[in-house]
Image: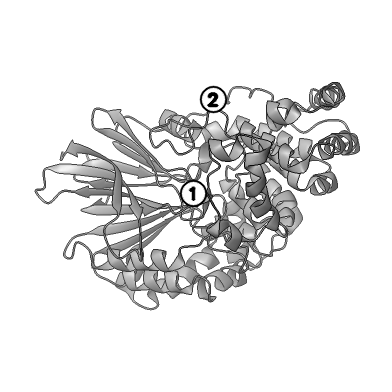
Amino acid sequence: MLSDPIAAFDAIHVISDIHMGGKPGFQILREVPRLAGFIDWLRTERQGQRLALVLNGDVVDTLAEEIEGYVAINDALPTLQRIVEGPSFGTVWQALAAFVKTEGRHLVVVIGNHDIEVALPPVQRYLLQVLAGGDLAARARVEFSTTGGGWTCLVGGARVYCTHGNEVDAWNFNRYEDLARAGRRLNAGQRLEPSEWTPNAGTRMVKDVMNSVKKQYPWIDLLKPETQAAVGTLLVMAPEKMNQLGDLLGIVGVKTAGEYQAPRRLSAGDAPAAAPASQTLEQLLGPNLRQAPARDTAQDMLSAAEDQYATAAPTGVPTGQLGTAGLVWDRLTGWIRGIDKPEALRRALLDWLKGDKTFDFVDRDTTCTDVLKAVGADVDIIITGHTHLARAIDLGAGRMYFNSGTWIRLMRFTEAMLRSEASFRAVWEVLEKGAMSDLDQASFGAEKLVLDRTTAIEVSVDQDGKQVVGQLVQINGDGRQPGKALKTYTRAVA
């Protein structure tokens, strides 16, 4: 019986959540020279061996670009061209091109939820031309994984599986069937009208809310939109934007509908997903933000909003008119505006960081637990991204779970910063200025607000050929040297 001919490598390196995109001043990727240097270093490592670089989702960020609608279908090529050939990120793509033109170097591109246009045939043809030109051998060393199935390989006999992680995220799962339909349209010389594309809840949050707020507060993009207290943060920083949206309940409804579908994205089963638990507005806002002087009034408003939310259709979208939801949010944002703004943000952040394990490398977060449920026992090493939070977890019996983290800025609000209104005042002043450069330079005591933490996952066979080594590493300096090991696990070569 013919066995599955899975590709085998001596080593693979996995990075994700690079988010190349956006105009200067609003770009959340900072360490571009380091990234280009890291790719160039990989090009010369392990000469004579087979090495793969896996870009495990959200490599580019078309949601940060000015596009028509929620997805760049009809203008995908000019959008990618701005990112790939422009002055901001061009050195990274030049390094990738040199990488794939080197014998024994393989490049794998997995899509996430910010770069779904990479699934489109014209975009793949364009990227192949940029990376390999007419070099057929180099073209053969580039692989795209864009159907939601992830990518798998063998390293030292250990089976490795890479997936972005948004497949199990009800806010941000991709509609792969719709992407395939868009690809067929483009290949047939047809257009896809913006009205024909149904975005997920996370995309709506980014495009309808985050991007407009980002014009004043570029750092708001560093708060993940699916985080519950991020909604409270948005209400605090720019309540008028939420007021303009008027139908956040609808977005939450889209997210709820996604909870029926997301658990099946990595599953072979056809059984319908269990009904999701209703997400209340109290959960979205968090207790600290709700503890305002006008507590009774606030509770009344939350109850009124939830009464409407309880009438939601099976899709999760309220059956009542969105105008009613708009009135509820008019009142709710008015209540939040009654709190001192710095104090309101401090409370929102306290909610966001309650029981915080954000930077705990061994914390089994939701992405970890949900992906593990969907991956078979024959997979030895599972690698995700998406959350921007690095993870390295020993699953026992030689199995490992990793999250490759991110290459964008990471803001860290410490307990000392949030302890009191007085301690938070200096942090507020930096945030209120809004500029990325101010954030990069901000320090409070011994703590920097923006961490220098660009991480990668390395899975390799050791020099003796006896062990498979899985490592979470931090890439420092110019990227042209081995990363600093943060967590290391080993298993015997099969």
| Residue that appears at 90% across and 38% down | 323
- Quadrant containing the N terminus in the rendered view: top left
| Residue that appears at 53% across and 76% down | 87
Examine the image and state in which quarter residue 98 appears: bottom left
Q: Amino acid at mark 1?
A: Thr
Examine the rendering and report whether any part of residue 200 can be seen: no
Q: Is residue 490 left or right of residue 433?
A: left
| Residue that appears at 73% across and 59% down | 193
Circle 1 Cα neighbour tier, 10 Å, few/some/many (<14 / 14–19 / ≥20): some
Work out whether residue 412 or residue 429 is closer to the camera in this orientation and state it: 429
Sequence-wise first label, 1 or 2: 1
Circle 2 Cα neighbour tier, 10 Å, few/some/many (<14 / 14–19 / ≥20): few
Residue 353 position, x and y percent, is 57, 34
| Residue that appears at 52% across and 76% down | 85
Label 1 and label 2: CA atoms lie apart by 20 Å
| Residue 349, numbered circle | none
Examine the image and state in which quarter residue 279 appears: top right
| Above/below status of 276 relative to 201 | above
| Above/below status of 357 relative to 213 | above
Q: Is residue 156 left or right of residue 255?
A: left
Tag 1, which secondary structure? Answer: loop
Residue 5 position, x and y percent, is 26, 48
Residue 30 position, x and y percent, is 50, 62
Q: Is residue 13 left or right of residue 67?
A: left
Name the residue that disc number 2 marks.
271
Name the residue that disc number 1 marks.
147
Q: Is residue 47 left or right of residue 434?
A: left
Q: Amino acid at mark 2?
A: Ala
Tag 2, which secondary structure? Answer: loop
